[in-house]
Amino acid sequence: MPGYRGHLTGGVLFGVGCLAGLIWFGIYRPEIDVALLLVSIVLAGALFPDVDTDSKGQNFFYTVLVVVDLALMIQEEYKWAAILGFCALLPAVGHHRGWTHTWWAMLLVPLPIILLPVFFYHTPWQHLLPFYGAAVSGYFSHLFLDKVF
């Protein structure tokens, strides 16, 4: 099992590879700031399955979430801050290598990326698919490296 550095490296390689493929084939061409956000989401997805244990990956993951959540609150984006906070609590519901290391969690855990903005902001779900895909890609890279499949 790789540590957090291995999962970050695997996430970057897999996520950037997927994004490069989408760009190469003309399927999706995000602006540079959106592409960087997508890579960040891939990295979060790559770490997520292990944030239920005391580790460097957990510290890194939650440090980033605290900074982003605080920035959202400063900008008075309280609904987005609440959505992020809700999602950050999910790993606490279970034990290590339990539900967070399953193929169905890989598909279900990122669903708030689509469902909550659609519900709270009436955002078209199609606009959110790249972000969901980035989270699933990162999550997949983690499970692949942990030999879950």
Image (cartoon, rainbow, N blue to C red):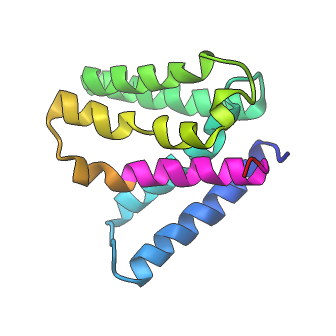
Location of residue 2 with respect to 64 vertically, above or below? below
Classified by dominant secondary structure, the portion drawn in magenta counts as helix
The foreground one among 72 and 18 is 18
Location of residue 91 with respect to 144 vertically, above or below? above
**Residue 142 is covered by the magenta coloring:** yes
Residue 131 visible, this angle: yes
> In this view, which residue lies farthest toward the right?
1
**Image quarter of the N terminus:** top right
Q: How many marks?
A: 0
Which residues are drawn in magenta?
Answer: 131-147
For the point 69% across and 47% down, the residue is 143
- Is residue 40 toward the left or the right of residue 22 in the image? right
Residue 62 in the image, given as x and y percentages of width and height: 59, 27
The foreground one among 135 and 73 is 135
Location of residue 62 with respect to 29 vertically, above or below? above
- Is residue 68 toward the left or the right of residue 124 in the image? right
Instruction: Write down the quadrant of residue 71 in the picture.
Output: top left
**Residue 29 is covered by the magenta coloring:** no
- Is residue 106 toward the left or the right of residue 84 in the image? right
- Is residue 84 toward the left or the right of residue 59 in the image? left
For the point 75% across and 25% down, the residue is 96
> In this view, which residue lies farthest toward the left?
122
Residue 44 visible, this angle: no
The foreground one among 56 and 130 is 130
Residue 127 in the image, given as x and y percentages of width and height: 24, 53
Location of residue 47 with respect to 53 vertically, above or below? below
Instruction: Write down the quadrant of residue 76 in the picture.
Output: top left
For the point 51% across and 29% down, the residue is 65
The foreground one among 78 and 16 is 16
Residue 16 in the image, given as x and y percentages of width and height: 55, 66
Residue 135 in the image, given as x and y percentages of width and height: 49, 47
